[in-house]
Amino acid sequence: MRGRAARLPNAALIPTTSVVTSHAQDRSWLRLARNVGLVFFLVAVFGAVEHDTLYANAAITTMSEKEIRDLFIEQMERGNALRQVALLALGCVGVAGMASSREKPWNVRWSVLAPLVVLVALSCLSIAWTPQPVVTAKRLVVLACVLTGCAGLARILTPREFLGVSLATLLLFISGSIAVDMAAGGRPWSGDYRFGGTLHPNAQATYCAILAIAANCLRLGFGRRWLKLVIIAAALGLIVLTESRTGLMAAVAALVLTWMVKLPPGMRWAGFSLGIAGATLLVVAYFSVGSGARSRVVDTALLGRSQQAGSLTGRLPLWDELLDHAADKPLLGYGYEGFWTEKRIAAIMRSQGWSLQNAHNSYFEILLQLGYVGLFLAIWFLIAGSTTLAAATTLTRDPGYAFAFGVVMFGVLNSGLESLFVKLRYSPVIAMIGLLMVALYYPLTSSDEPESRLPQRRVF
């Protein structure tokens, strides 16, 4: 008995490696199953919120301006029960994620979070001066659901999982859009074809651009690197088919910036210098050829849509008119979602002579809604968020942070000519999840990923 008792302490000290490994593998499979579930959940939510077969084979272009205006106003005022349920579900998932997840501790970066908090508070206070308080109140509930969902997903997912889930959802959405477009009679080889599927072509271009950025950030083995190149090439090719010039230029620029942020800090200036040299070479080459060749280059760069290029397809006259409206309420604007009333939409459409429901510029949208105060806070948030994402990429060398940085950069560039990133869409939600990852849960060390402590099984 004494000998057996003496052996018990030694036996208790024997490492239970196989038990620990088995438990870790079980957790890895559970995370994989959870992430697959999140992919289909996000597809269901934003399929209900954003996607519509109305855009299949550019069917919306056959509608009159009055029909488009009436459809937009009806959607703005009545809403949709399925959309409401989907957004409520997103908010509930966010609450559950923030409350239950313990693997990613809170580590707030107030330089990023403070401008967002003040901006949201300003949006809430704008009920006091908005011309349509009921619409503003409804949109604030939507905003609360989206921000809560983003904060929860930012805590549930590690940066690598965030990259994988985003890639998978975008592949499903884009594949579905291709199928819907083809079923509706769309043919890419026809001269008047614009790829849209279940989205407006300009919105579809943002999906394809973010897909290209995600593929660019994938870490694949040497024998599988061709796969990321195929995805990037296919995504850029689809952007060309959307004929979204803004989307294509912003995507290329974002890919370059993402490549640069992944470089070691000492090499970033070299990468920047290389980019400047390449751009200079292109400019010199452009002016070295004849006028006919330059015209063909410009037409190719504009994807064959050279009409009204000098006015940015009618945007400059629109912005001139919107600046007059902004001058009436420069400090605090017309309130959150308070500018585009039914009467104002009809008046601006008549004066501009084409169908529109937004400013075609995210910064103008913020200026009109929340004035120069709101615009200042939004720009502060974007600058602080993008620099913090770059710092997190340098600290962790995690491709998920580089992906988030690339999406934010694409949004910043795309917002100069589109209003997509201030609307309820999946693309800005991806950007917001990435920003909240560093605003609320900034990485404590260079190796705080949960999977770094598990057996090396990839979770997405």
Image: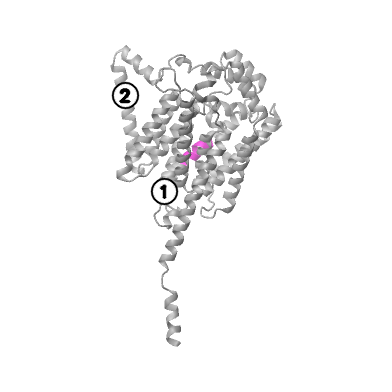
Q: Give the quadrant of the N terminus.
A: bottom left
Residues packed near mark 1 inside 10 Å, few (<14), some (14 to 19) or many (20 plus): some
The amino acid sitting under disc 1 is Leu
At mark 2, the secondary structure is helix
Residue at the image point whose x is 53% and y is 35% from the top: 426
Magenta residue check for 381: yes
Q: Nearer the viewer, residue 339 or 230?
A: 230
Residue 119, quarter of picture:
top right
Name the secondary structure under disc 1.
Answer: helix
Amino acid at circle 2: Leu
In the image, residue 326 lies at what x, y percent? Answer: 61, 23
Instruction: Tell me the number on the disc at residue 101.
Output: none
- Point out the stretch of residues depicted in magenta: 380-387
The number of numbered badges drawn on the structure is 2
Packing grade of label 2 (10 A; few <14, some 14-19, many >=20) is few
Dominant secondary-structure state across the stretch colored magenta: helix
